[in-house]
Amino acid sequence: MEELEGIFVDLFLFVDELIKDYGEPVEPDETELEKLKNIIITSPASNDHHLSKNFYLIERVAGEILFSHYVDKYLGLEYDFDLMTFHSSIRDDIHGWHYLREYLTWGKVAYLFFREIKEKNEIHRYSFKIRLPMRLKDGQIYWVLQSSSPLELDKNKNVISHINSYTIGELFAEKDIVPLVGGIFKDGFYCNEFSQLYLENRYAVSPFVLSAPQKSILKYFYKNPDKTLRSCSETLKYPVNTLKKYISDCQRKQGIINKAKTSFPSIPFVHLKDVISYLERTGWFNNG
């Protein structure tokens, strides 16, 4: 449970930074939202057992669930579930939370994509799709296709909420890890240009992997925030110039700060203390 909570602490810190300048939703209005919910509830896709099995979620980027349909039927979750509980269904029986981590990494880049494209007045024409393994109510794991579209916007066209539809496919039978690959669609058609850009951005977001000396440096300054590089050098037995490269390496981009910028692209890291502050909030020093 602690590992799962740590995964979501990282997500929510990312989201907090992403939405810090977002405003209140101005479109669509409440009447239009209710019409949309009613369409979902009465849709043949929701009620005809001959058609694909679907469930739905409307969620705020900030984490609030505004609406769900058939989540109880297919996932066994009651109305008052939260996003962490919902997303904990994304997994297989072998690799722990690997697929959940992959999915949330894709999700981060999707949020960044919609933030960048908001200046186009056609943001509602775009959607993001990804196929992922989910454990359903019957205890088995299935491939499920998620399609996400912007819903509520603020006055500056920032995405405040989005609607997710989930279509249940075949049983998940893979034993080895299968890469998750998301894509951007426009008017329902695959958008190659943006999908390739999205793919490149996904792999630009790297896991936060440090060398043993870098971990030692972070832990030293976490425990001794007022100490200098020279005192760190004397304690850890690394030359000052070597410490500087471990912290920020402009040439090879392998310093602590460089890696943090790549792993957490929405966080404005400038100094080592910024990285330490962020990692402290994620609980990294308790597990790292």
Image: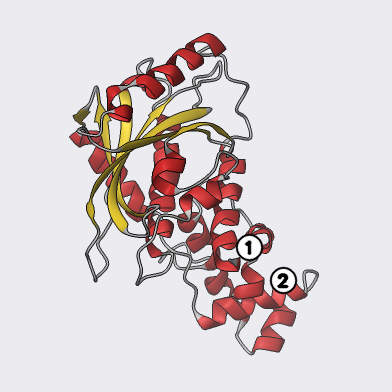
Quadrant housing residue 57: top left
Give me the disc on residue 89. none
Instruction: Pick whichever, 66 or 217, lies toward us.
Output: 66
- Residue 266, above or below 281: above
Q: Residue at x 53, y 51 (%)?
A: 85
Residue farthest along the bottom direction in this orientation: 237
Image location (x, y in percent) of residue 157: 49, 20
Give me the disc on residue 279. 1
Query: The residue tagged with tag 2: helix, strand or loop?
Result: helix
Instruction: Pick whichever, 88 or 21, lies toward us.
Output: 88
Category of crowding for the residue at label 2, using alpha-carbon neighbours closer than 10 angstroms: few (below 14), some (14–19), many (at least 20): some
* Count of numbered circles in the view: 2
Please state, as top left, top right, bottom left or bottom right, where the C terminus lies in the image.
bottom right
Q: Are marks 1 and 2 in contact (CB under 8 Å)?
A: yes
Please state, as top left, top right, bottom left or bottom right, where the N terminus lies in the image.
bottom right
In whole angstroms, how far apart are the C-alphas of marks 1 and 2? 10 Å
Residue type, label 2: Tyr
Quadrant housing residue 64: top right
- Is residue 60 shown to the viewer in this render? yes
Quadrant housing residue 248: bottom right
Nearer the viewer's eye, disc 1 or disc 2? 1
- Residue 32, above or below 12: above
Residue farthest along the front direction in this orientation: 49
Q: Residue at x 41, y 42 (%)?
A: 73
Residue type, label 1: Leu
Q: Which residue is mark 2?
A: 222
